[in-house]
Structure formats: C-alpha cells, structure tokens
Amino acid sequence: MNIVYLITGSGGSFYCGNCYRDMLFLRSIRKVPGITAKAIPLYLPPDKSNTDSGFDDHVFFGAISMYLREKVSIFKNMPSFFDKFFDFAPFLKLAARQAGATRTEGLEELTLNMIEGDNAFQPAEVKRLVKYLTENNKPDIIHLSNALILGLARQLKKRMDIKVVCSLLNEDDWIEDMAEPFRSKAWELIGREAEYVDRFVTPSRYYRDLFIQKTGLDAKKIDIVPLGFDPEEYNLTRSETRPPAVGYFCRVNAHNGFDKLVDAFIDLKKRNIIPDLTLNVCGGYTGDDKPFVSEQIKKIREYGFKKSIRIYPEFQGNKKAEFFNDVDVISVPVRKYDGYGLYILEANSAGVPVVQPSTGAFPEIINMTGGGIIYQPDTVEALAENLAGILNDEILRDALGKAGYEGVRYKLSLALMSDGLKQLYETTVAGK
C-alpha cells in the first residue's frame, strides 16, 4: 500500500503541534511492513527536523505565489516559472518567520478557495501535483493534513483513482479567527466537501464531537486514533541543584495563554511561595507574535524578575531535551480549546507532569496519561494555586511524572498509533 501525505507546513519558525503530528504519522507508518509512505509539503517547507523523515523536496501551492495570485492583480496569471522562483525554500521560510502565512487576516478568501473543490482554484498547480503524484509511484491513499485543504479531495479524485483520508484537528483555531460571513461559509463548505473524503481521522472524542457540531458530518465517517509518542533517548542528567522551574512549551502567543502563565508566575514570585522559581520558555514565535512576547517580558522585568526567566531559542532535538531537563512542571493555559495537546505527551514522555485548564481535550488526554492536574475555573488564580501545589509537593510531582511517562509508553505509543492508522487505511482501501 502506498500512501502520500499532503501536509501544510509552518516553515519551522515555531512549535506546531499539527506539523509534528503529521511527522509522527509518517514516521510511524513507514515502519509498518507492506506500507510505503512519503510526505509532500504544501504552502511552506517542513522544519529541519523533518528533512530526513520521508518529506519530499518539492513544495506545492507555495505560500508566497498563492498570496500574490490572490492579492495582487498583476500576478493572477503569472507564468508558472515565477511560482518556482517565489517557492524557493529560503524565501518561504523567511515568509513564515515574518508571519502572514500563519494567521487568518487577509487570507479569508484564499482559505475558502482551498476548502471549496469546484472552483478549480490554481488549476495549473493542481495539474502539476497530479502529474507528480502519477509519475512518482502513484498512491493508493492521499492523506490530507487538515480540512482547510479539503478542496483538493474533489480535484484529485476527478483526475486520479485514489482514496482520500483527511485529518481533523484544530481547524477551528483558524476558522474562528475569520470574520463573518467567511467563518460560517468555511464550516458550510467543509460539510459539503466532506462527501469527497472516504474517511476522516481525529485524535480525540472532544474534537470529533466539535467537528460534527460545526459541520453536520456523519460520526460514522470519523475514526478516532489517539496520537502516539515514544520517549526520545537523551543522555542528560537532571541537576539536583538547579532552581525550581515552571515550563511553557508551545508557540509563544496569546492564543496559547502565555500571558496567563506569566501572570501566574508573577503572582507566585511576589508571594515568594517557591523561592528562586524560574519561568522557562520554549516553542518559538512568528513576527506577528513579537510585540506580544516583548510585552510579557517587559511585564516580568517591571516586577523585578528579569533574571528569573529563561527563553530557549530552539525547540528541537537536544535543545528540547535540555529544556525538559530544566523544568519541574509544564503548563500551556490555552485560550482556544485544544483538540489534543501534543505538548502534554512531549512533557509526560520526559517524565514532566503538566498543569492544564479543564478545557477542550485536556481532561480526556490527561486521564489517559495520568501525568498531570486539570483545574477549574480557568483563571490565573487557579493556575497559580495548582502550580504552587505541585511544586511544593515532591512526592505528588514525582508520582505524576512517573505516571505520565508510563501512560505515554503503554497507552499512547507510536506503535499503537501506527496500528490504528494501518487499520484505518486498510478499511479505506477495502471501501468499508
């Protein structure tokens, strides 16, 4: 069985949970006997950690050329060789760092065009993609990374004899940021275009139910395959003399509640509940996020705690391991409800417990791993108290850390995820 993943990238400028999920899918399914798989990036190239994981060198529907065709009239009918120029990887990565392609403002029409399958949007690029897929070991299954590119299902099925699977996770983050009438239209189009997808897959019951509510999709068409994660082997030893630390591991922005964690941290420092407490931050950000990040750092400095914050510039490989080695607990107190929270698995697999609000899929996932605390109400005060509780209770902290590690290892491993994906693909090919 040959599977091709069409994956929308972030360009590698920040920790992208959905991008990492796609990489985990690819990494795990390539280990299954009888299955070959590769990934083709759309919009932006993958981050450097994915370059040796079966990702293709070609980028289709490059973010810069797509934007120019949509927004600048003189570029609407530009020759295809200009696409190749604008899709040069360094240009695309620069675009990702400067933002633009990773936020909704000004991209509403473009979003609807990629969801809608009957408008032949970017026909030359669709033709180029079909030609490439056909000439390079034609796939049995095309796996779309999210419902925001759902229009490709109809376009590809018109031209190829294939099955289509589509992942569902956190599309609402993008769509709910869109102004009306674009927001309602996006959900409506997804519900309509769903008929061209053979199966959908999502990692949580929470997100399945949310998607059904938003689109009217038939629940029987959605499979739940929890994301899996295997602990990475690092040769690092946790220091017994380092100061206690709260960690934040995600893209640093308001949507993910970084300012809420900063306020809770400042509260704990002002009350000196945990002497020498530090705030360690890892996950990166875009140009759009810089003013917000600067504002939070300024706030910490104004309270006199500038020496108590540490920002990790890298969020991959050994640098990521160093970060997890330096923290006692992780919290990402998101404002937008998360459909999974892969950072929970990342922390738990490193033996680090989490403290999360009782929102979205967090209760469901933490119940599976056993590696954390969920709190309500979702306030800064409740967050601060729960962080204080776990930081001041070494026995509880160690127990949750161990439970989380074991929970990921035995309940949410890559092997279990690949078994679920394999069954999904076999069912899809069989037409059941």
Image: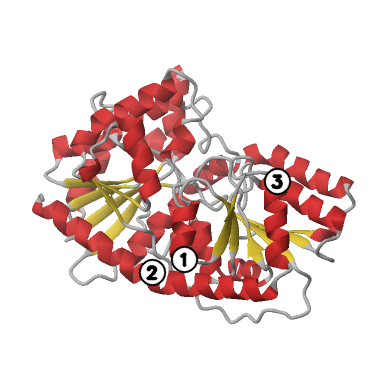
The residue closer to the viewer here, 25 or 41, is: 25
Q: Amino acid at mark 2?
A: Lys
The residue closer to the viewer here, 410 or 390, is: 390
Asked which secondary structure carries label 1, the reply is helix
Q: Position of residue 16 (x, y in %)?
A: 51, 51
Residue found 38% across the figure and 69% down from its top: 411
- Circles 2, 1 touching at the beta carbon (< 8 Å): yes
Q: Position of residue 3 (x, y in %)?
A: 23, 56
Residue indicated by mark 1:
369
Residue found 56% across the figure and 78% down from its top: 234
In this rendering, position of residue 200 left or right of residue 24: left
In this rendering, position of residue 107 left or right of residue 384: left
Spatial CA span between label 2 and label 1: 7 Å
Residue lying furthest front: 376
Question: Quadrant of residue 198 in the image?
Answer: top left
Disc 3 crowd rating (10 Å Cα; few below 14, some 14-19, many 20+) is some
Height in image: 36 above or below 283?
below
The image quadrant where one finds the N terminus is bottom left
In this rendering, position of residue 270 left or right of residue 219: right
Disc 1 crowd rating (10 Å Cα; few below 14, some 14-19, many 20+) is many
Height in image: 322 above or below 218?
below
Spatial CA span between label 3 and label 1: 24 Å
Residue indicated by mark 2:
411
Residue found 46% across the figure and 61% down from its top: 367
Q: Position of residue 392 (x, y in %)?
A: 74, 68
Q: Amino acid at mark 1?
A: Thr
Residue indicated by mark 3:
380
Q: How is the image coloured?
A: secondary structure
Task: Indicate which disc residue 35 carries.
Answer: none
Q: Earlier in the sequence, mark 2 or mark 1?
A: 1
